[in-house]
Amino acid sequence: MRRSSARLLARLAPFALALPLAALAQTGADLQPLPAVPPPPPDMAPFDAALEPQVTIKKRDGDTVEEFRIQGRLYMIKVTPPHGVPYYLVDNQGDGNFMRMETMDTRTRVPMWIIKSF
């Protein structure tokens, strides 16, 4: 079986070597420049600073509190303790009730507690 695979490789080797040479042999005489980049569509909205979040950073009892507002409405708070992991308070419904989130990732995660290791 090894002898037949060696014969096959010996037959394919010239083709494998000739393929890169054929690519190098092409001349660049028929190349054309790329067309110019078209302008952006006219219906694109201009930058609106009112839609950008306003971030206020405060220090409270050693914690760094970042308040995020859009058009004056507070929608998220990020709290970074001096020694720990930051957490978020998010107003999902817009009713002023904030819900704590450990990360901004909304994927459902299966608990993977180690009960016993062997």
Image (cartoon, rainbow, N blue to C red):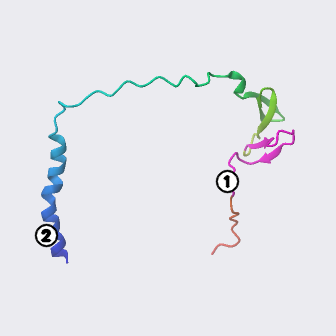
**Image quarter of residue 108:** bottom right
Most foreground residue, 74 or 83: 74
Q: CA distance from mark 1 to mark 2?
A: 54 Å
- Say whether disc 1 or disc 2 marks the residue closer to the N-terminus: 2
Range of magenta residues: 86-108
Q: Residue at x 78, y 26 (%)?
A: 71
The reply to whether residue 63 is visible in this rendering is: no
Q: Residue at x 69, y 63 (%)?
A: 110
The reply to whether residue 90 is visible in this rendering is: yes
> On the image, numbered disc 1 is attached to which residue?
107
**Image quarter of residue 77:** top right
The residue lying furthest to the front in this view is: 43
Q: Secondary structure at mark 2?
A: helix
> On the image, numbered disc 2 is attached to which residue?
7
Q: Residue at x 79, y 36 (%)?
A: 75
**Is residue 116 toward the left or the right of residue 39 in the image?**
right
- Locate residue 46, reporting x and y percent: 62, 21
Contact check, label 1 and label 2, Cβ < 8 Å: no
In reply to whether residue 93 is colored magenta, the answer given is yes
Q: Residues within 10 Å of mark 1 (few under 14, many from 20)?
A: few
Q: Name above or below for residue 106 compared with residue 67.
A: below
**Image quadrant for the C terminus?**
bottom right
Check disc 2 and give the amino acid type. Answer: Arg
| Most common secondary structure along the magenta stretch | loop
- Locate residue 76, reporting x and y percent: 77, 37
Most foreground residue, 50 or 41: 41
Check disc 1 and give the amino acid type. Answer: Arg
